[in-house]
Image (tube, coloured by chain):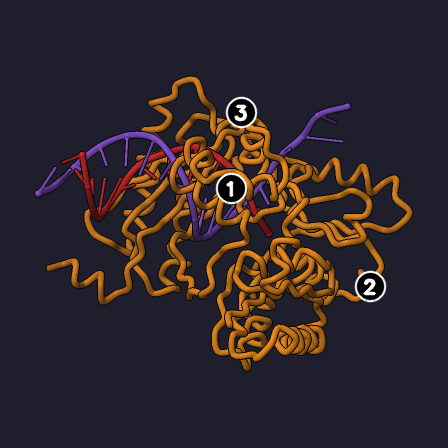
Chain colours: A orange, B red, C purple
Amino acid sequence: MVIIAHVDLDSFFASCERVRDPELMDKGIVICMYSGRGDDAGAVSTAGYNARDLGIGAAMPIKQAKHIAADADIDVAFLPADKAYYKDVSARVMQIIAEDITEVEVASVDEAYVDLSDCETFDAAAEQVERIRGRIREDEGLTASAGIGPNKLIAKMASDENKPDGQTVVRPESVEQFLADRPVDDLYGVGAKTADQLDDIGITTIDELAATPVQHLVSVFGDTRGVALHDKAHGRGAETLEQREKKQLSRITTLPQDTRSMSDIRPVIRDLAADVLRRVTSHGVHFGSVSAIVITADRETRTRSTTLPAPTQSEETLYQTAERLVTAFLEEHPDLAVRRVGVRTGAFTDEKQARLGEF
DNA sequence: AATGATACTCGGC
DNA sequence: TTACGGCCGAGTATCATT
């Protein structure tokens, strides 16, 4: 019997800060990404639960969050995101999870799937997940929520049921009931845009989606997405875990002001390229493709990318390629100004494969 | 026309 | 009153090759 669990650390960044500074215990915590464009310009990355109760949430402008906090009864701390620290904590938590589990899929900095198919029953699996969460609490002072189900989709959705610091078991015979009556955008992978499209054809709940002939979905969404929607609505998902390897690595930043002058943009690309290269080489891989990411003044994201003649670790190649892509983009769009710019690498090969490419 | 590779956008966290 | 990051992977469109 396949049993998959999804373990999800609660408001992870905010919880990391609370562990580092226990004085934050009863305060609201708001983790901020500052753009550098002046006081409080930027967006909220994560809010702790006390701050969420005030209505502060991810992607909210920091200024708006501060206005909410100003009227609140509790103290709210605004802290800059310290990703390097969170990554360290994450690595230790993943070690804890992997301690006596044979197969773990690290899905992101704060999430992992574990294969518990060795357990005889869902009850036994649930007990094992309790133990894992207990160790995370004891060793790192963090709470986690978890979902246990017959596949990754149900495990992931179940982990949202009892947040924070809770877990939910969904047995195969309960999947249909678990999904029924929920809005379609509760399905992982169905966001606002897809939900709107479904609403247009008269589908708002998961059981309505499940009752829709797959033919009809395919005719509206195309083969891949149509079948995927049908499967999800019936609670079907992957039953095996994978070892994820990094497929791309990027850095992006906000410019001091909107510009279309390459003399402003060049030094920024230079710094981003240096940083990306440092991370690429630390992984011991060569990159075979380069992308430039441009967010224009009207906040539209655009990308330009190219495949290199051969994978490389050359910083100069990375910089020059990214610079060329941005220059070409500006020439293509004489009317657009640049707000944010980024450098992305992908198509990685390890050193052995890179040398094979030389022959 | 079929297949696979590459380019680009979308959406989750 | 407004206010707005930095990543990642997946899906889709488009191109190249046969």
**Disc 2 versus disc 3: nearer the observer:** 3
Q: What residue did someone put label 1 on?
A: A253
The image position of residue A194, as x and y in percent, is 54, 35
Q: What residue did someone put label 2 on?
A: A23
Distance from label 1 to label 3 (Cα)? Answer: 16 Å
Q: Secondary structure at mark 2?
A: helix
- Mark 1 belongs to which subunit? A
A246 relative position to A19: left or right = left
Q: Secondary structure at mark 3?
A: loop
Label 1 or label 2, whichever comes before in sequence order:
2
Label 2 or label 3, whichever comes before in sequence order:
2
- Mark 2 belongs to which subunit? A
Mark 1 is on which residue type?
Thr
Residue A99 falls in which quadrant of the image?
bottom right
Mark 2 is on which residue type?
Glu
Residue at 50% in and 29% down: A300
Is disc 1 in contact with disc 3, using a CB cutoff of under 8 Å?
no
Q: Residues within 10 Å of mark 2 (few under 14, many from 20)?
A: few
The image position of residue A254, as x and y in percent, is 53, 38
Residue nearer the viewer, A42 or A140: A140
**Disc 1 versus disc 3: nearer the observer:** 3
Q: What residue did someone put label 3 on?
A: A298
